Image: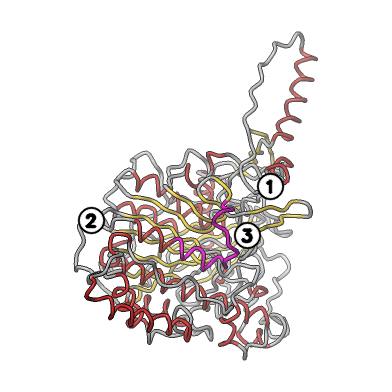
Amino acid sequence: MASRGCAGPPPPPPSQAWVWPGKMLAMGALAAFWVLSLLTYGYLSWGQGLEEEEEGALRAQSGERPEPSTTAASQPHLIFILADDQGFRDVGYHGSEIKTPTLDKLAAEGVKLENYYVQPICTPSRSQFITGKYQIHTGLQHSIIRPTQPNCLPLDNATLPQKLKEVGYSTHMVGKWHLGFYRKECMPTKRGFDTFFGSLLGSGDYYTHYKCDSPGMCGYDLYENDNAAWDYDNGIYSTQMYTQRVQQILASHDPRKPLFLYIAYQAVHSPLQAPGRYFEHYRSIININRRRYAAMLSCLDEAINNVTLALKTYGFYNNSIIIYSSDNGGQPTAGGSNWPLRGSKGTYWEGGIRAVGFVHSPLLKNKGTVCKELVHITDWYPTLISLAEGQIDEDIQLDGYDVWETISEGLRSPRVDILHNIDPIYTKAKNGSWAAGYGIWNTAIQSAIRVQHWKLLTGNPGYSDWVPPQSFSNLGPNRWHNERITLSTGKSVWLFNITADPYERVDLSHRYPGIVKQLLRRLSQFNKTAVPVRYPPKDPRSNPRLNGGVWGPWYKEEYKKKKPSKNKAEKKQKKSKTKKKQQKAGAFPICRSGVCRYRG
């Protein structure tokens, strides 16, 4: 059986499923033509040539009238699409050999964000999007939330969907969560989403939806709200499956009522899997990882076209704001490319944190433009709440800014700096010291900050190569082709003028020590506001074998009455036992300045 596209055209709206008897003959002929076109081209053509034809067929088949120029909803529909591990170069309008006609068209008709930043890995970007706060203010400074960790986005943070629900929005999430699930209170439906369909972990098989975190720690990871979605799993490729769910949500929702739809696609994160027909256009790519990655991205591009068609078909488009973003830079060893930027996913070089992003909407005032103002993923929180006519409590200290006028009208950004991160427990730079930081900052600590044109990095910033396109001409990104930089002995501070040198080729830290000191002081100021790191040890109770073969909440509060101790020795012995029980039960450590203590 031939593989289909990434979710076909949307089904007809329930309220318009009838047709007039006098039109039955014409409708039958049109439906026959439509089916024939599907068999010939798949659910969508490769390019954009058939888009209008398909859209017209969709409308005619459903008996739908043309969408009115306005809708009854005053608040806009908010559609946030988050791709996973898409490299900076991996979009057509950045010069990629991978064809992305949908993304190119949407971006060209909207506003391209060409000074847009995210975090270098999955959990931090998602947490900052949904809270509007830097990760130093949520305790998620270090790494990602692992499947076996009793950890999640802190429950005392008001999330974006929660704020939108306050002003009447229906909120739906489709795709990858990756913000923790050890307790039921951490699940998406408890964090503001009316419905959730997707995965809880950071990755997994695109067809079977199984994930092994380590030998013997394997389980199923596809959820419908708070339960395993066994009944909804037909072995469909996840990009296709998620798009079908988006179409169903749009088909059943009244466009006169405001909608927030968060679509967090699994693609193009590893494992590198795609339906066979998407490989046809990339037979010339010798590197197998790059070829698979290209097929996955083409499938994703087609899926987003189908989402856009569904928005138009069901009457949402004219009052919608579509935001597209990658969650971090690409991983060259898994097919991604960030050229000509330096570094990759997991690093604080530009290749890890500068992202593909754009806004597409009929509501934009300046369409077809490029925004080079500074924008960060935390900015979506206040921006979307403002667009939704919501309120942000005065006592909430956000790190994001409302940047709608910057994007829509071309005004200057209110943002002048970005704290990329401070990670106090990441592997320390061997030669970093307080002396190297002029007594202001310990440069052994991994940190990165941007202030206007200047960017400062300290500690160990991560893999620092430039990986040009020719690196993918053989079986893996071949380091023979890479432009490699061996970090100088004793080096733990770097300074770049990103506006003049976006590829980070000229370190200016020795030439401008005064600028270095200013940025180190800014880092120190940020660090004073940091909350303790939440990075608990593995909890054996997380094993899916103990939960019906499914990854899911496992932690249960255990209440035990405390008996008064008779003497100091007995008290000391009991305290020691309690600490061991906390570690065993999955209490998480709070670490500051290298000292850790456990907190339930």
Q: Residues within 10 Å of mark 1 (few under 14, many from 20)?
A: many
| Between marks 2 and 1 in the image, the one whose residue lies nearer the viewer | 2
Which amino acid type is marked by label 3?
His
| Location of residue 560 in the rendering, given as x and y in whole percent from the top left corner | 66, 20
Above or below, comparing residue 514 to residue 102 in the picture = above
Of mark 2 and mark 1, the one earlier in the sequence is 2
Which amino acid type is marked by label 2?
Ala
> Under tag 1, what secondary structure?
loop
Above or below, comparing residue 469 to residue 497 in the picture = below
| Location of residue 127 in the rendering, given as x and y in whole percent from the top left corner | 50, 52
The reply, left or right, for residue 592 in relation to residue 325 is right
The N terminus sits in image quarter: bottom right
Which amino acid type is marked by label 1?
Thr
| Location of residue 359 in the rendering, given as x and y in whole percent from the top left corner | 36, 68
Q: Which residue is mark 2?
A: 73
Of mark 2 and mark 3, the one earlier in the sequence is 2
| Between marks 2 and 3 in the image, the one whose residue lies nearer the viewer | 3
Contact (Cβ within 8 Å) of mark 2 with mark 3:
no
> Under tag 2, what secondary structure?
loop
Q: Which residue is mark 1?
A: 148
**Viewer-closest of 529 and 409:** 409
Q: Is residue 241 magenta?
A: yes
Q: Which residue is mark 3?
A: 209
**Residues at marks 3 and 1, CA–CA distance in whole angstroms:** 17 Å
Residue range of the region highlighted in magenta in the rendering? 229-245
